[in-house]
Amino acid sequence: MLEIRSTGSLRSEGKTLRGYAAVFNSETDLGGFVEVIRNGAFRKTLAGGSNIRALYHHQGDALLGTTRGGTLKLHEDGHGLAFELALPDTTHGRDLAVLVDRGDVAGASFGFRVADGGDRWEQRGAQLVRELLDVELHEVTLTHDPAYSDTTVALRSRPGFVLTDARRLWLETCE
C-alpha cells in the first residue's frame, strides 16, 4: 500500500525549486499515532537508482520532474530529504512557480511504501509512535497543506545556490 505524507528544472527561465520533502526527527501527529522519520530512511531508495517523480499535490498528471530525467535531484543530509527541482515550462510548472513565489505553496510531501522491517511502533504512555527507518520512496510532492509543517520549498533563479539552513532559505526568498 502506497502511503503519502504531506509536510508544512527543466530550466524555464532558470526557475528551480529547492527545499525539504521530509525532515528527520520531527514528530507529527497523524491522528491515531505520532510519526517520526529517522535519518537514513531514504538511503536505500536513493542508492538504488529508482526513478522518483516530482508531482503537484500527488496528482500523477501533474508531473514536474523525475530523477531519471535529471530534473529532480534528491539527497539526504543531516536535516532531512533535500530536493532540487528544475521546473518545466508547462502549465503546472509555471503555475507552481507563481504559487511558490506568492507563498501560497510552501510545503512538500512524499509518497512511500514501508520496506519489510522499515518501521518500528512503540507505545509511549497514551501515545502510539511510529518511527520510519527504511522506506521505498516513490514521489515527492509540492503542496499548500503539509502534514509535516517543517518541510520547505522556495523558488530559486540563482544558479549554484547551496541549501544549508532552512531559515537562510526562507530569508533569501524575501529578497
Image (spheres, grey):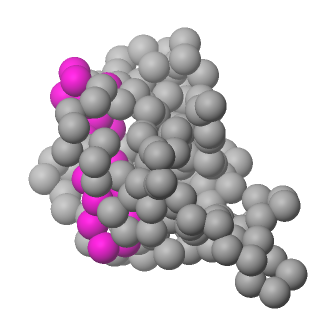
* Boundaries of the magenta span: 66-86
Is residue 169 in view from this perspective?
no
Q: Is residue 85 magenta?
A: yes
Looking at the image, residue 20 lies above or below residue 155: below
**What percent of the width, then of the height, locates residue 130?**
64, 65
Query: Of helix, strand and loop, which mostly describes the magenta segment?
Result: strand
User: How many marks can you see?
Assistant: 0
Is residue 161 in view from this perspective?
yes
Q: Is residue 36 magenta?
A: no
Which residue shows up at 44% across the image and 33% down it? 138
**What percent of the width, then of the height, locates residue 95?**
54, 27
- Quarter-of-image position of residue 127: bottom right
Looking at the image, residue 104 lies above or below residue 54: below
- Residue 158 vs residue 21, the one in the foreground: 21
Report whether 63 appears left or right of 88.
right
Which residue shows up at 39% across the image and 28% down it? 53
Residue at the extreme front of the image, as rendered? 117
- Quarter-of-image position of residue 59: top right
**What percent of the width, then of the height, locates residue 22?**
47, 57
Looking at the image, residue 91 lies above or below residue 173: above
The N terminus sits in image quarter: top right
- Residue 1 vs residue 167, the one in the foreground: 1
Which residue shows up at 62% across the image and 39% down it? 3
Report whether 77 appears left or right of 113.
left
Residue at the extreme bottom of the image, as rendered? 125
- Residue 171 vs residue 49, the one in the foreground: 49
